[in-house]
Image: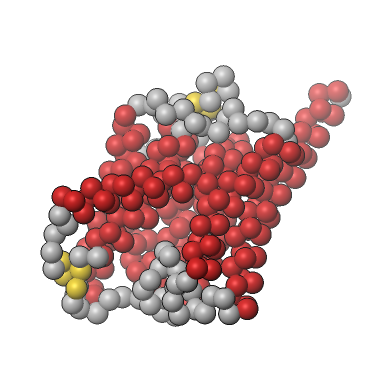
């Protein structure tokens, strides 16, 4: 009887904390964006300072929400965040290699349809600058991973890996909707029809979230998740600067093209049994590979 009374308040507190995290994370990202859109500060045609503020606010808003919940609501601290970086090298190699592969496949599909071609290969200096961009982007994306993966996904592990990954990633995909509604620091291309772009964005981000969540749970570390997220966000954008000719596709169409290789990777990992639930050891904060 005493045990039941102890467990129920804990479950209630965690449900409340997760609800607050989701509502706060959406609020910090969506309210500034839609206020700026409604007042004309974001005009829907080109990036400006407001789109930059809204764009940067997305990842840091998730971090702030997780901090508030951990520090002031549950008082649980940060033991289970996954900040250890000394993990098997294979996780870092997968975090870089897999997004390079699926992004390159997505770009090949894009070129096949658009008719664009490479006009020049990146120079060693440009590749070095890309490496710096990759690191900076990964540090910015710490906020998203600290919130979505090391808090929400980690709390939902008890549901089992497949359900936790899909649910967290779908909510994460919905959270990204404002980004596709206007050109921004992330999207400089023509968005196209919102009826194509918004579902495409949700599908793409949901699939990406499943893969990032997978590497987080398998490595029990936030760093490979940040790295995978950064490579996926930057590699195609980097190569796009060396393309010319043809008819560039709208962002709405490209999101569906980018989703295709991601879906293939998710299916392959599922067939390999990679989404079977694993148990995190509380003492070490680790998940069995």
The percent position of residue 84, horizontal first and vertical second, equals: 46, 27
Image: 168 above or below 279? below
Can residue 9 be seen from the camera position used here?
A: yes
Q: Residue at x 33, y 51 (%)?
A: 133
The percent position of residue 221, horizontal first and vertical second, equals: 46, 33
Q: Residue at x 34, y 69 (%)?
A: 254
Q: Residue furthest left?
A: 120
Q: Residue at x 54, y 75 (%)?
A: 42
The percent position of residue 192, horizontal first and vertical second, equals: 41, 79
- What colour scheme was applied to this rendering of the protein? secondary structure
Between residue 26 and residue 160, name the one nearer to us.
Answer: 26
Which image quarter holds the C terminus? top left
The percent position of residue 282, horizontal first and vertical second, equals: 58, 23
102 relative position to 72: left or right: left
Q: Residue furthest top?
A: 283
Image: 255 above or below 139? below
Which image quarter holds the N terminus? top right
Q: In terms of image quadrants, where is residue 126?
A: bottom left
Can residue 159 be seen from the camera position used here?
A: no
Q: Residue at x 26, y 51 (%)?
A: 129
Image: 235 above or below 149? below
24 relative position to 41: left or right: right
């Amino acid at each position: 009887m005493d045990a039941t009374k102890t467990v129920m308040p804990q479950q209630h507190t965690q449900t409340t904390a997760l609800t607050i995290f989701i509502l706060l994370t959406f609020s910090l990202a969506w309210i500034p964006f839609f206020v700026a859109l409604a007042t004309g500060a974001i005009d829907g045609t080109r990036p400006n300072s407001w789109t930059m503020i809204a764009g940067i606010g997305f990842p840091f808003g998730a971090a702030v929400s997780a901090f508030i919940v951990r520090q002031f609501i549950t008082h649980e601290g940060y033991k289970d965040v996954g900040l250890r970086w000394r993990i098997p090298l294979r996780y870092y190699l997968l975090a870089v290699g897999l997004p390079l592969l699926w992004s390159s496949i997505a770009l090949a599909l894009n070129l096949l349809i658009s008719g664009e071609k490479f006009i020049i290969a990146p120079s060693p200096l440009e590749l070095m600058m890309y490496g710096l961009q990759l690191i900076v982007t990964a540090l910015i994306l710490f906020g998203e991973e600290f919130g979505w993966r090391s808090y929400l996904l980690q709390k939902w592990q008890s549901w089992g890996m497949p359900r936790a990954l899909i649910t967290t990633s779908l909510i994460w995909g919905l959270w990204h909707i404002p980004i596709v509604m206007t050109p921004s620091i992330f999207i400089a291309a023509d968005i196209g029809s919102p009826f194509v772009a918004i579902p495409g964005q949700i599908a793409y981000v949901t699939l990406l979230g499943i893969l990032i969540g997978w590497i987080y749970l398998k490595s029990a570390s936030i760093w490979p998740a940040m790295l995978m997220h950064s490579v996926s966000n930057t590699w195609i954008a980097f190569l796009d600067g060396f393309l010319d000719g043809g008819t560039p596709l709208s962002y709405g169409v490209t999101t569906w093209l980018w989703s295709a290789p991601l879906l293939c990777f998710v299916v392959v990992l599922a067939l390999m049994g990679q989404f079977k639930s694993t148990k995190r050891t509380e003492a070490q904060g680790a998940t069995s590979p």
